[in-house]
Amino acid sequence: MTTADLSPQELRTLVAVAREGGFSAAAVTLGMTQSAVSHAVRGIERKVGVVLFARGRQGARPTAAGERAVAHARRVLRMLDTLVAEARGTGAGPDAGDTVTGPLRIAAFRSAALHLLPPALERLAARHPGIEPTVRVVREIGPGTAGEVAEGRADVGIATLGTSSPVPPELIGDVLLEEPYALVHPAGHPDPRSLPLVDWTENCSSYTRTWWAAQDWIPCATVRAEDDGAVLSMVSSGLGMAIMPALSLTSAPLTTEITDLGPDRPTRSIGYVTTPELATTVAVRALIRELRALRPRVG
């Protein structure tokens, strides 16, 4: 036997066991017995030729090979769903692109989900009412939104792109906009650069780190927040100043003031990432088109 013998049901079994963390819980979601799930996984492992799950008292956890296999399984199952949706749309007539229906899974970091996606999704709904977008907010730390796409949990990721966060080799993507950083501080403060720095982890991991290091007026952060919204709240309360990208400052409180950092200010690249196979699908292409249409109005 070869891996070509793997059926969609076997792929669903792999995904369910990984998601539920064990054979018994996966059996419940699949409507199977625990022994049937266990037998199915052993059969899959024989076909693939490698152990995919480590069994133990705490359940079953994917091995390194298993994690990779599950990611591929999610992506294959997603393409099977897309095959059906687009084939049905094609059968509906010459304007098939307008009749495609089904989910569009989007992963985005917080400020993109709040300020970049809503107008794009509004335009998408007007042109493609059958597409059903769902947005999952993911912290842009470690694998971030790109990791959600690579693992098959999202179709498109809105990601920060740069030298320290390039597009993963198995994905494709492009920059949608460059957003500048600015200084935000309590309104009317006579010397905002003298204030303590308020920051959050996602901001510190930005590839603008080199610019930050060259600014002798920027102190080490003395106040840490969970996200950019909390940073703005602290700044508006007079607890310090912050250096933030434009999307995060879209809804800055009236009690804050934004000061330009000059021509050498750092910028952050915001783009999309998706898989090569999903990049050609109607739903993904439609979303990217709407995001590009909004580009001149952002940043």
Image (tube, grey):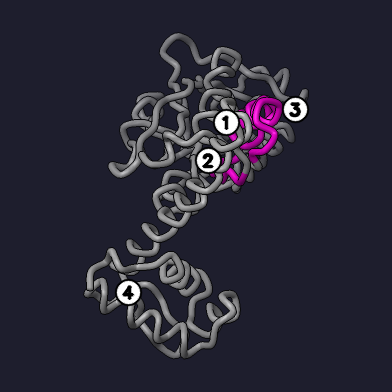
In the rendered image, residue 250, in percent from the top left (x then y), is placed at: 66, 25
Query: Circle 1 sits on which residue?
Result: 96
Say whether residue 133 is magenta.
no
Give the side of residue 236 with respect to residue 7, left or right: right
The CA distance from mark 4 to mark 2 is 32 Å
Q: Nearer the viewer, mark 1 or mark 4?
A: 1
Query: Circle 3 sits on which residue?
Result: 253
**Residue 115 seen in render:** no
Q: Is residue 292 positioned above or below 218 on the image?
A: above
Task: State the residue at coordinates (47%, 28%).
Answer: 270
The CA distance from mark 1 to mark 3 is 45 Å
Q: Amino acid at mark 3?
A: Pro
The CA distance from mark 1 to mark 4 is 40 Å
The answer to which quarter of the image holds residue 184 is: top right
Give the side of residue 51 with respect to residue 253, left or right: left
Frontmost residue, 128 versus 108: 128
Q: Amino acid at mark 1?
A: Ala
What's the magenta bit mostly, secondary-structure-wise? helix
Say whether residue 126 is magenta.
yes
Task: State the residue at coordinates (42%, 35%).
Answer: 279
In the rendered image, residue 268, in percent from the top left (x then y), is placed at: 45, 26
